[in-house]
Amino acid sequence: MADERKRILIVDDSPLLLDLAKEALELAGYDVLVAQDFSQISNLQDAGKLDLILMDVQMPELYGDDVAAVLREMRGVATPIYLLSSLPAGELDKRAREAQIDGYICKRDGIDALVEHVTRILNGP
């Protein structure tokens, strides 16, 4: 029996980024769900097991790191959560630590780096 494909949720308000990231990650062998706003997260979480959540920081309604902290602390979400943002790495590191989530990925590094980082997160070095 073949291994199940790992499932990733990307939350970002940029349709362009969602399209590019979804296509690249699907080509790399992952199932990808996308959400453009936070209201879609609960429905997608109920759609089945997620292996990774990538959360944009600068969203129109709320900061993604605040939502990630709520998912982790108040809703008990154990899925790895990484911030996905073009903010400077130092700020992303601080936000991730304060939200008590797993880390961050810089959008500035490009789509190929995103795929490499996700592969490391989900499959090890």
Image (tube, grey):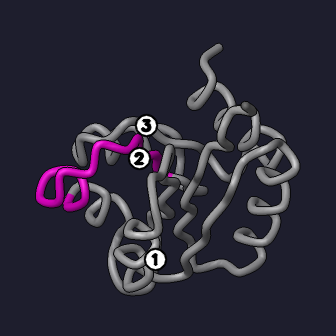
Q: Amino acid at mark 1?
A: Met
Give the CA separation, mark 2 to mark 1: 16 Å
Mark 1 crowdedness (10 Å alpha carbons): few <14, some 14-19, many ≥20: some
| Bounds of the magenta segment | 70-83
Q: Position of residue 93 (x, y in %)?
A: 40, 38
Q: Decide if residue 24 is on the left or right side of residue 40.
A: right
Disc 1 on helix, strand or loop? loop
Residue named by callout 2: 81
Out of 46 and 20, give the one closest to the viewer: 46
Label annotation for residue 103: 3
Q: Tell me which numbered mark, 1 or 3, is placed earlier along the sequence.
A: 1
**Cβ atoms at labels 2 and 3 below 8 Å apart:** no
Q: Earlier in the sequence, mark 2 or mark 3?
A: 2
Q: Which residue is mark 1?
A: 59
Graded by Cα atoms within 10 Å as few (under 14), some (14 to 19) or many (20 or more), the crowding at tag 2 reads many
Gap between marks 1 and 3 measured at Cα: 18 Å
Q: Residue at x 33, y 58 (%)?
A: 65
* Residue 91 shows up from this direction: no
Question: Are the residues flagged by discs 1 and 3 in contact, CB closer than 8 Å?
Answer: no
Report the amino acid beneath label 2: Ile
Query: Does 46 sit left or right of 72 as displayed?
Result: right
